[in-house]
Image (spheres, helix red, strand yellow):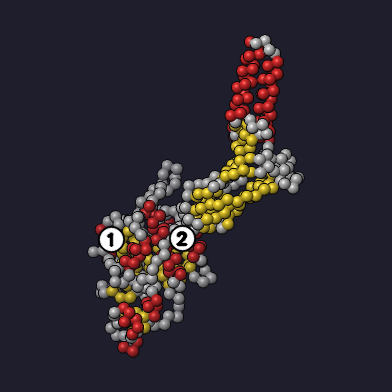
Amino acid sequence: MPTDSSTGRIRRAASSVVLTSRGGGFLCAAIVTFIAAPILSLPALLYVTGLMLALVIFSAVFVFVGHSRVRIERSFTPQVVPPGEMTHATLRITNLSVLPCLEARWSDDLPHGISGDAGGILPALGGSHSRDSRASFSYALQGLRRGLHPIGPLRVNVLDPFGLVFRRHSFGEPGLLTVLPRRVDLRPIAPRGTSEDGATRPAPQHVGLGEDDVIARSYLPGDAMKRLHWKATAHRGELMVRQEEQQLTPRAAVFLDCEPVGQGTARDRQGDWEYSSSFEWSIVAAASITTHLVRAGYVVIFQSNGTSIDHFIAGGEDTLEDAMVDLAVVAPEVRDNDRRVVPERAAFVVLGRPSVERAQHWASHLATSRTVLALVAANTSPEALGVLDDARWRIVTYRPGDDIGSLWTEFDGARAHAPG
């Protein structure tokens, strides 16, 4: 006796067989001839009825049996793409059945966020023992939205030789295509930290990222006059001294807060996270800052508040692409999963709209960082901003539609400001 699962498979297979308009016409004609035969006293019409029904039944059996054993191999070149760039999907189809496969129309299921002309004509395939039992074809895809996107399965509509019936087949498992988050090119800046007495001073370890800041810093009381850097002084319009030689590669930390309430998202009825423009903006900002620091020669610790992102980007360790792949699929993380972040002397923090409690959490975790530059949502409460201000963070507020490159320049020493 068939099990529930086998019965369900049979039902699904039977429901996949569909009459074409021609097949529907044949059935209608069969009914008409069946009714007309006794009325017109023409028994020969019953033979016509039988012939038409036999053709429809034969066609249904043909498409039901055909293409029943097909192997699909799908690959992407490349498999990881930046948004807006093209990749090519290649499908290799092998007929494993002894029966040949007729020419059919195919299409690949594309999710939201992926565009491409994923459809065409599948050539006829010979039986499994013939040389022409295999076929391959490619088509172009464009990733529009970050994420890990399932491409497929392959849909094939198999038509019988008479064009009366076709069957909707679904072959193979979806292939996964990774689209990286968007990144914005950031210009070199010379951010300043804040000393304990409230006076500004250069951020540590060449946080400026500008060419002059790598070899010079602002003059501080007690610096020897022989260390004055005259070229930088003339360029900056203020006294600059040569920076001490650093034996270690400069380091910085980048933190992304994925806490859902602060990022303005919650789970829907299906259990998926609702779209948040603030969260997507934060991801682009974190990706841009991390890329900027790595390209400037920094060792970068890149973490989220939870467990999704934890990278030490340096020679021989994680790569920048490793971090971007994690960012491509990062989702909001509840505060129960908060980890103890690894503070560095220079830290860059991208927050949503933190509560006072959340602001206190970040301020305490980064209390040992000498310089903290933060991007915070513009609708954050004054009380929460006050907590970060008391921790002597440099804060620039943003709205999801703002240009990241423009906001980044507000961290420049001459323009950076704390909320008051």
**Between disc 1 and disc 2, whose residue precedes?**
2
Image-based side of 71 in relation to 286, left or right: right
- Compared with residue 298, is residue 157 higher up or lower down, i.e. above or below? above
* x 39%, y 61%: residue: 285
- Compared with residue 14, is residue 38 higher up or lower down, i.e. above or below? above
Kindly identify the amino acid type of the residue bearing the numbered disc 2.
Ile
Image-based side of 223 in relation to 161, left or right: left
Indicate the position of residue 244 as horizontal and vertical percent values.
Answer: 39, 83
Q: Find disc 2 in the rendering and name its residue.
A: 309
Could you tell me how far apart the alpha carbons at marks 1 and 2 are, in whole angstroms? 25 Å
Would residue 326 be visible to someone looking at this image?
no
Q: Which mark is residue 385?
A: 1
- Compared with residue 87, is residue 371 higher up or lower down, i.e. above or below? below
Q: Quadrant of residue 407?
A: bottom left
Indicate the position of residue 82 as horizontal and vertical percent values.
Answer: 49, 58
Would residue 165 be visible to someone looking at this image?
yes
Query: Are the residues flagged by discs 1 and 2 in contact, CB closer than 8 Å?
Result: no
Indicate the position of residue 286 as horizontal and vertical percent values.
Answer: 41, 62
Q: Secondary structure at mark 2?
A: loop
* x 67%, y 48%: residue: 135
* x 31%, y 78%: residue: 236
Q: Quadrant of residue 213?
A: bottom left
* x 49%, y 70%: residue: 314
Image-based side of 391 in relation to 258, left or right: left
Kindly identify the amino acid type of the residue bearing the numbered disc 1.
Leu
Closer to us: 92 or 270: 92
Indicate the position of residue 97 as horizontal and vertical percent values.
Answer: 71, 41
Q: Quadrant of residue 154?
A: top right
Closer to us: 284 or 165: 165
Closer to us: 214 or 311: 214
